[in-house]
Every structure is written in C-alpha cells, then in structure tokens.
C-alpha cells in the first residue's frame, strides 16, 4: 500500500490542499496520512510553563486541532479513501521529516503560500527546508 503524507497547516487552507492531492495523485490503494506539527509546549522548549490558564488554552487549542483533523479523516473515509491523522507536537520541519520516515511515506505533500520579503527576512522558509531535508519525493501545492 502506498503511503501519502499530507502536512497540514491550519493557517493555510487544508481542504484546498487535500482536494488538490486527490486531483493530482493516484490515490488508488493508498493510505492518506494527515499530519499536523503542533508547536511544542513552552516548557518543552525551555520556557517556564506559565499560568494554568495558558496551559488550559493551549490544551483547548490542541483538542480543536485534533477534532479538525478527525473531521478531514471522516470526510475522506466517507468518500472511500483510507485515511488517518496524527497531531504531533514539535518543531515543524523536524516533526514532518520524522513522521515521513516513521510512516514509511512514499511521497510528502506540503502546501505553500507566498510570503512577503519582510516575512522571509525574519522567518525561516519552512517549505525550502522541508524539501532540502526530505528523503522522499515532495509535492508542493501553491495555496
């Protein structure tokens, strides 16, 4: 069975990304993995955990993201696709690359949106780094 890993970023349009994958890839007999790399908890990256209400808000946010991923899986399953989802906390690129290997993905699909030059100065380009570090073919879909 082929494994297609779709990296989900909730800031982009996940439904457009998923629909484009279904249009351009042969998904016959494939398992579609929807993987979202959620930001790690502040205490994990060396910061103090902060007040309880912040931790509660973060937990609520993660539950919402998990529920949204589950909804995409249900939608795909209802349309006859074999799909599953993972929400993994960690640095985006490292998490996506790690899950690609763990799931033995045959292809990695990522969405890409244009950023301003100012954004690029102060932020790392996730798409480029993911492509550079991937050990499987990467399909980039503009969003």
Image: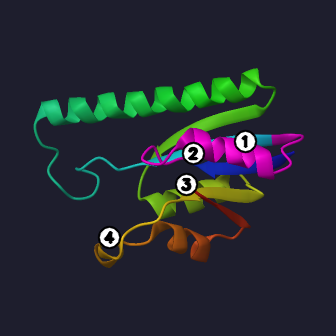
Q: Does residue 83 belong to the magenta stretch? A: no
Residue drawn at 89 percent across, 40 percent down: 29
List x then y, in percent, for residue 101. 67, 59
Image quadrant assignment for residue 60: top left
Between the residue at mark 2 and the residue at mark 4, the CA separation in whole angstroms equals: 25 Å
Residue 35 - label:
2
Between the residue at mark 1 and the residue at mark 3, the CA separation in whole angstroms equals: 19 Å
Disc 2 to disc 4: CB gap under 8 Å: no
Q: Which residue is mark 1?
A: 32
Between the residue at mark 4 and the residue at mark 3, the CA separation in whole angstroms equals: 17 Å
Neighbours of disc 1 within 10 Å: few (<14), some (14-19), many (20+): many
Residue nearer the viewer, 48 or 134: 134
List x then y, in percent, for residue 50. 12, 43
List x then y, in percent, for residue 25. 81, 51
Residue 119 - label:
4
Residue nearer the viewer, 107 or 23: 23
Between the residue at mark 3 and the residue at mark 2, the CA separation in whole angstroms equals: 17 Å
Mark toward the viewer: 3 or 2: 3
Is 119 on the left or on the right of 66, as rendered? left
Chain-order first, disc 1 or disc 4 = 1
Residue 143 - label:
3
- Say how many tags the image has: 4
Is 106 above or below relative to 12?
below
Q: Which residues are magenta?
A: 8-30
Neighbours of disc 3 within 10 Å: few (<14), some (14-19), many (20+): some
**Split into 4 quadrants, where in the image is the C terminus?**
bottom right
Neighbours of disc 2 within 10 Å: few (<14), some (14-19), many (20+): many
């Amino acid at each position: 069975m082929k494994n297609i890993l779709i990296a989900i970023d909730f800031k982009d349009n996940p439904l457009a990304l998923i629909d484009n994958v279904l249009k351009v890839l042969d998904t016959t007999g494939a398992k579609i993995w929807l993987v979202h790399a959620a930001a790690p908890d502040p205490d994990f990256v060396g910061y103090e955990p902060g007040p309880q209400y912040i931790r509660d808000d973060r937990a609520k946010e993660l539950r919402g993201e998990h529920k949204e991923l589950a909804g995409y899986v249900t939608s795909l399953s209802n349309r006859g696709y074999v799909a599953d989802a993972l929400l993994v906390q960690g640095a985006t690129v490292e998490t996506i690359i790690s899950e690609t290997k763990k799931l033995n993905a045959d292809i990695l699909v990522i969405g890409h949106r244009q950023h301003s030059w100012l954004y690029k100065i102060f932020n790392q380009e996730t798409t480029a780094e993911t492509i550079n570090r991937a050990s499987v073919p990467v399909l980039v879909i503009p969003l």
